[in-house]
Image (cartoon, grey):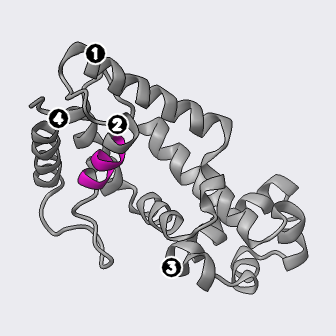
């Protein structure tokens, strides 16, 4: 049965995500992606332009899934850290894609899409509200604080996989670390 263009594009994207997770953008090979997707390299280039465009799309998906799955509720950054830890426990491939993004110099353009930026702005606004309410030290730059919370929520991640301790334990550690980080001095 012949696939639709949308189905072929999705299979290419899924094969690319697997390739990027294992090899990063530098080690990923277009021929392996096309072969694993059951598509031609020409079709891949027609859909995504080049390997960088394909990587950007894969990273945008990982970032968007993480951002939309884990929001900051009631400006509670401690609970956010725990939920973020749990999300990445269940979606380690998203975490790995985001790690590759940080290692690649040109991948910041993947974060410039409207939906990703809008979600990031909502999180920055939540930090500012918490600062105004006195629950978060106003000396923190909101963007830097969110990056610290992300790093804290993923402290357990290793190249070999998740920390062998329980998801609950790791979420509690992340929550306590963020609680201490946020305490106004």
The Cα atoms of the two marked residues, 1 and 3, are separated by 43 Å
The Cα atoms of the two marked residues, 2 and 4, are separated by 12 Å
Q: Quadrant of the N terminus?
A: bottom right
Q: Does 32 appear in magenta? A: no
Q: In the drawing, does residue 158 fall left or right of residue 142?
A: left
N-term mark: 1 or 4 = 1
Check if mark 1's residue and mark 4's residue have beta carbons within 8 Å. Answer: no
Q: Position of residue 4 (x, y in %)?
A: 86, 56
Choose top left, top right, bottom left or bottom right for residue 179: top left
Residue at left offset 28%, top offset 15% = 132
Choose top left, top right, bottom left or bottom right for residue 126: top left
Residue marked by disc 3:
22
The Cα atoms of the two marked residues, 1 and 4, are separated by 13 Å
Q: Does 151 appear in magenta? A: yes
Residue marked by disc 1:
132
Residue marked by disc 4:
182
Disc 1 crowd rating (10 Å Cα; few below 14, some 14-19, many 20+) is few
Disc 1 vs disc 3: which is toward the camera? 1
108 lies above or below 118: below
Q: Secondary structure at mark 3?
A: helix
Is residue 12 among what the camera can see? no
Disc 2 vs disc 4: which is toward the camera? 2
- Choose between 13 and 123: the one closer to the eye: 123
The span picked out in magenta is 146-152
Residue marked by disc 2:
141
Residue at left offset 9%, top offset 40% = 180
Q: Position of residue 50 (x, y in %)?
A: 80, 70
Q: In the drawing, does residue 113 fall left or right of residue 4?
A: left
The label on residue 116 is: none
Residue at left offset 54%, top offset 81% = 23
Q: Secondary structure at mark 2?
A: loop
N-term mark: 3 or 4 = 3
């Amino acid at each position: 049965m012949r696939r639709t263009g949308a189905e072929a594009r999705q299979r290419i994207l899924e094969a690319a995500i697997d390739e990027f997770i294992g090899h990063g953008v530098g080690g990923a090979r277009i021929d392996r992606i096309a072969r694993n997707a059951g598509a031609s390299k020409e079709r891949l280039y027609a859909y995504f332009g080049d390997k960088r465009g394909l990587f950007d799309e894969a990273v945008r998906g990982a970032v968007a899934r993480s951002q939309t799955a884990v929001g900051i509720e009631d400006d509670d950054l401690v609970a956010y850290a725990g939920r973020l830890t749990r999300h990445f426990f269940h979606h380690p491939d998203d975490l790995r894609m985001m790690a590759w993004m940080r290692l690649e110099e040109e991948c910041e353009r993947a974060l410039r899409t409207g939906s990703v930026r809008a979600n990031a702005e909502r999180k920055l606004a939540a930090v500012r509200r918490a600062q105004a309410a006195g629950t978060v030290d106003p000396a923190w730059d909101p963007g830097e604080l969110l990056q610290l919370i992300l790093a804290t929520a993923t402290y357990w991640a290793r190249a070999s996989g998740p920390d062998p301790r329980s998801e609950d334990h790791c979420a509690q550690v992340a929550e306590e670390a963020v609680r201490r980080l946020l305490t106004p001095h």
